[in-house]
Image: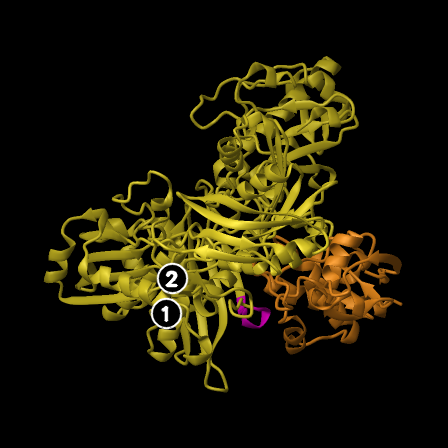
Amino acid sequence: MKLTSLSGAALTLGFYFPATAKEAAFLKGDVAENLGIDLNAWIAIDTSGKVTIINHRAEMGQGAYQAVPQIIAEELEVDMNSINIVFGVGNEKKYGSQITGGSSTVRGSYKHLGRMGASAREMLTEAAAAKWKVSKNECYAENGFIIHKPSGKKANYGELVLEASKLEPPKTVTLKRPEDYKILRKPLPRQDTPLKTNGKAEFGLDKKLPGMLYAVVERSPRFIGKVKSFDDTETKKVPGVKHVFATKTGVFASTREGVAVVADTLWAAMQGRKALKVTWDDEGFEHHSTEQLYAKMNEDLKTKEGISFRTKGNAIAALAKATKKVEATYETPYESHSCMEPLNCIADVKEDSCEVWGPIQAPGWVQDNLIQVLGLPREKITVHMTFLGGGFGRKAFTDYTQEAAVISKEIKAPVQVVWTREDDTLIGPFRPGMVYQIAAGLNDGGISGFNYKMAGQDMDHQWPNANRESYNGSTTEGFLEPYFNSIPHYSFADIPLDSPIPVMWWRSVYASTNGFAYESFMDELAVAAGKDPLDFRRQHLGEERYQIVINKLEEITNWKSRKKNEGYGVAITECFSSIVGEVVKVSKGADGKVKLDKVWAVMDCGWYVNPDIIRAQVEGSIVMALGAATKHETHFKEGKALEANFNTYKMPRITDTPEIEVHIIDNEEKAGGVGEPGLPPFSPALTNAIFDLTGKRIRKLPFNLEQV
Amino acid sequence: MAPLTLKINNKDYTIEADPKMPLLWAIRDVVGLTGTKYGCGIAQCGACTVHLEGNPVRSCSIPVSAVANKNITTIEGLSEDNSHVVQQAWIAEQVPQCGYCQSGQIMAATALLKKNANPTDKDIDNAMQGHICRCGTYPRIRKAIKTASHMMTQKASTK
């Protein structure tokens, strides 16, 4: 953040110390950068008292733009409606991790952001006390003012900032207690909402630079195929087309080839591309189809032990001794992220510098990548985040940013590379489809052994120099922790699938598919044990935090008095340190079809900022899960993705959406994630509800709700 | 490329463009109003929705030559300051998450309420099911339309 752009003297406070550093003295002042220590600033105040708070994370709908400042503003004692909020540029030395993923923004930095606010408040208080020659203990901060309690003297932050900036930041600060919160835990309206109701919020696709050209790229449809040749004769005839050339982009350890068409308008570039003819060399690698992929995964589950992730005792022996055995196989599909804003990025690469603007989840990673690709030092690579029209993990990848930079460098001009919806849906990377095989034994109505195997692509095996013998670190993502205590014998393993299809994080990552397997199976065990599904979970989840979630679900759904002619299904998963339980209610419509009536969700995310944002995130997670469960799938045929746009990759609509009721647990636990944990429990809760209603067990997603 | 005149938000813009170019790109790239969004290009998602003579249309699928001299309203034309009742309802119900689809959603909702000030759930379904929201704000969209309807009723009754 450039201090020179603010009026008057600006106070820049607060420096982020990475988690590994000690709680050392805070340093201050705008000379901080000269000291060369990992420094950061979230707060600037000008002499008129206008406060600017930095949001250092991406805003993709999940509410960082509101939550980060809300945490700081609580301690700083300023009114959210009176502040400026600006995105921080990519600068992990200043801000620490800016990787916006894993639902980590609040849980990863809330105490530290609170300290930033408190530290600034203390310095302003000290400046006021010095100015009035009174004791600091007689002064307090409130709503942008420091007030001297005995005399009633007050000064606004603008009057104090110059003197405060000369002081030493406090070595330690005490954060407010939850009972003293004025704005935290309150459903404050989001500061970005008014920008999103009148077209003013600037997304990546909206940004324009003077002299900027536009590019669209015809990319390898089989992901790792090579450009054999291309004919741009007709393309070059399209008015406005300026350049046509082959491109190469690093995607994990592979190269994605393409042909870029650059023009002075986006429309001209698109027209130029329509006239382009590219022939691909797709030799030397597998061209997988969906049928093959799933046949392989199922075969692997039957014939291979897998790479062990976690074991206790002897699951196989326990199963052999069990009075009752249950076994099932579950299938989940490949998915596209399908953010409403398709991928795009602006790059302006000059001789010795590069500037990037885009809907970017991880600006630090973009810098890391461009350091390699452009051979420029980090301080010469400026990465600006715009608002993101959705991210869900796709926009954390640095392929599309790299591609834009390479094109800009080639044409020696700023360029915006735009992915059409078809590009965005076909080229991936995708959420991997996974197949699960679970077998468990029951003795006296309790789980005596649990043998879990999952088959499918391991995202981490794609990186350069990856160890392909290593287990999938996310094998038990979603599975509730207390099960590891209550189940005496277990084994969790995965069988990685090798394919040229690129795969990556998709909202809640492996928990999104694991959750379906785990919680469907838990329901099948409950049924086999002759137990109520909630009681069965109570029996196996001894820890109080989980009992509270179960009890809450029982209460809000009137579980004990649920009607026999309605179907109720429950699922509880945890990921990113939050526990979410959901109950789905279905019933038979007048036409005999199953209809989805209602979803209740209980979110335990420990410490939290804004309950309305949490409710919105859970509502949205449920709708997204509904899509993956009942609406859309990416199929592959002969190595290419099939579904190109929303006419075939069918998204859930307002007409598909049930009533959703979200409850938040209040406790003293540390903050857990909010953006993703609401997703995994939905699909198993839905299929469990359908089983409850119809006796039909659905083990393959997606399924057509109309045809149950 | 003969010049043609687009009437957008009560202003005339004389532009030079390929007559086949979709209105969406004329609005966004030629005139520079970026509130209207590109989501799919095949009229499946609604992000490009504008009003043509007051009716909601998919600007990605209308060639610019077909709308010369017709009245077009974009999201920017609803109000200077978020004062339009639908915008007020959207803010009251905290509808947007990422916000990318919301211009189109609001334009559709505005057209619905203009024709039908007290829409039922079925009316809302019919008007809004052509719009995709990946963030899943549908429950709040439905609520906001009803809130807007109440606000309109209140406003009318205080006249």
Residue for point 67% across, 26% down: A140
Per the image, is A160 magenta? no
**Helix, strand, or loop for circle 2?**
strand
Q: Quadrant of residue A468?
A: top left
Q: In the image, which disc is placed on residue A571?
A: 2
Residue for point 50% across, 69% down: A598
Q: Label 1 is found on which chain of the structure?
A: A
Q: Which quadrant of the rendered structure holds the N terminus of chain A?
A: top right
Q: In the rendered image of this protein, which colour is used for chain A? A: yellow
**Helix, strand, or loop for circle 1?**
helix
- Does residue A566 appear to the left or right of A359 in the view shown? left
Q: Which residues are magenta?
A: A653-659
Q: Position of residue A377 (x, y in %)?
A: 54, 25
Give the vertical position of A457 relative to A628 (above or below).
above
Q: In the image, which disc is placed on residue A688?
A: 1
Give the vertical position of A705 relative to A479 (above or below).
below
Q: Is residue A655 visible?
A: yes
Q: Label 2 is found on which chain of the structure?
A: A
